[in-house]
Amino acid sequence: MDTLIKNGTIVTEGKEFLGDIYIRDGIIVEIGENIDKTADEIIDARGKFVLPGGVDAHTHLNIHMGDIVAKDDFYTGTVAAACGGTTSIIDHMGFGPKGCNLHHQLKVYHKYAAGNAVIDYGFHGVIQQVDDSIINEIESMVRDEGISSFKIYLTYDNKVSDEEALKVLIKLKELGAVTTVHCENDGVINYFRNLFVREGKTDPIYHALSRPEESESEAVNRMISLADVAGDAPLYIVHVSCEKSMEHIVKAQRQDKNVMAETCPQYLFLDETMYREKNLQGLKYIMSPPLRKKENQDLLWKDISNNNIQVVATDHCPFDFKGDKQRGKDDFTKCPNGGPGIETRIPLLFSEGVMKGRIDIKKFVTIVSTNPAKIFGLYPKKGTIGVGSDADIIIIDPEKEVTLSKAMLHENVDYTPYEGIKLKGYPVLTMVRGKVVARDNVFVGEKGYGEYLSRKSNIL
């Protein structure tokens, strides 16, 4: 099977040019002008952008939170991703049974994904306790299983201590792997959550007030210090939500520390006033970290422009408003954390970022595709349009106008936090390894087509 994409504006790795792409057996074999070859399919991309497929480095498919299960599994979630222009995901595995080893959850997640995913996928390891056996097991996960990044949490039931975090940082640095961290100060959060519940302050806004910006920024600063003590171990801070946290990250980066930052669309487009919406609609936005004051948004955009934020991912963790989120109607602490966004990341960032001049198209490609591929060991197989790379390609029509709504999305959840936002520019074709899997917002791919991505160390 061969395909020829003609006349598109190709953007990849700091380059933008008019050209053609010739694909054979799922691999890009030629890039140039006026390629004259016969092909099984010829796609005319005139007037459109031809970009490397999106890499979403932060999703939560099939995740269990107690007796609640995320509404998107590896089939529905990857269908939505494909329709939104994402061709690869790296999923953060959820916690397993108390005391389980690292391979336990890996086996569980392989069963979730194999035969279901429609795009390519990898996993971040999850560390829920730290002892000698876990530290020793990390090596086989990296070298034999292709897991080159692991996540630790500084809050929730399976949080790690500073000493445990340090042990993980040291071990992962030794192996050339990345430590990713959910940074919030557990003591601050528990104090305010308990105080607000005792005082009867249980509306959704108190979710945000119980997790102040300082609880995040303190934890970010602490992890930067621990990574420094660990010999400048690679550190990736997930879902940065506020400028207070970025101040510590920017300072570390200016000192050439190996610190990388990720933010998410919710922190660029939504703010804490949403928690005050009537009829408990504010429950839709309960996620951690919470939405912040609006002034953070412009500052985070500047951090993207200045190369201080390397990646925009989604933290896609969908629960229905009816039934799931409404468990918090009388007490915000009963509401499951998380929100949908796997399908809307690329359209939002293109329309509100590129088309409105906040970032240029080359920066857009960097933050949604190239950087996550490089940081997490997928490059140059993924994240670039280059000879020898997988033909993971999206075509965006900059003139296509769309109003986001639950009705037009494929996410298997009963709402979108971006309902009614009008966009200019939208993906009209998504290709994974040379196969078109979505066209004009219709999924045309095949269940189980996605392949597991064994990742190597390849840090920026």
Image (tube, rainbow, N blue to C red):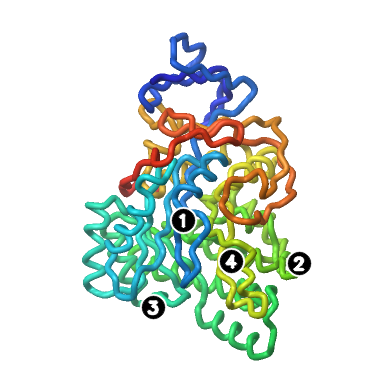
Return the residue at label 4. Answer: 287
The spot of residue 296 in percent (x, y) is: 67, 61
* Secondary element at image label 3: loop
Residue type, label 2: Glu
Q: Amino acid at mark 4?
A: Met
Q: Secondary structure at mark 2?
A: loop
Mark 2 lies on residue? 277
User: Measured along the vertical axis of the image, is residue 121 above or below residue 299?
Assistant: above
Q: Which one is earlier in the sequence, the residue at label 2 or at label 1?
A: 1
Tell me the distance, in whole angstroms, between the alpha carbons under discs 4 and 3: 23 Å
Circle 4 or circle 3, nearest the eye: 4
In the image, taking residue 73 as reference, residue 454 lies left or right, namely left
User: What is the three-letter code of the residue carrying label 1?
Assistant: Leu
- The three-letter code of the residue at mark 3 reads Ser
Give me the C-alpha separation between circle 4 and circle 2.
15 Å
Q: Is residue 423 left or right of residue 156?
A: right
Circle 1 SS class: loop
Return the residue at label 1.
61
Specify which label sits upstream in the sequence, 3 or 2. Answer: 3
- Precedes in sequence: disc 4 or disc 2: 2
Residue lying furthest bottom: 198
Q: Nearer the viewer, mark 3 or mark 2?
A: 2
**Residue at the spot of label 3:** 161
Can the viewer see residue 233 in this picture? no
Question: Measured from the top left, where is residue 454 in percent x and y?
Answer: 31, 46
- Can residue 451 be seen in the rendering of this structure? yes
Mark 3–mark 2 Cα distance, whole angstroms, equals 37 Å
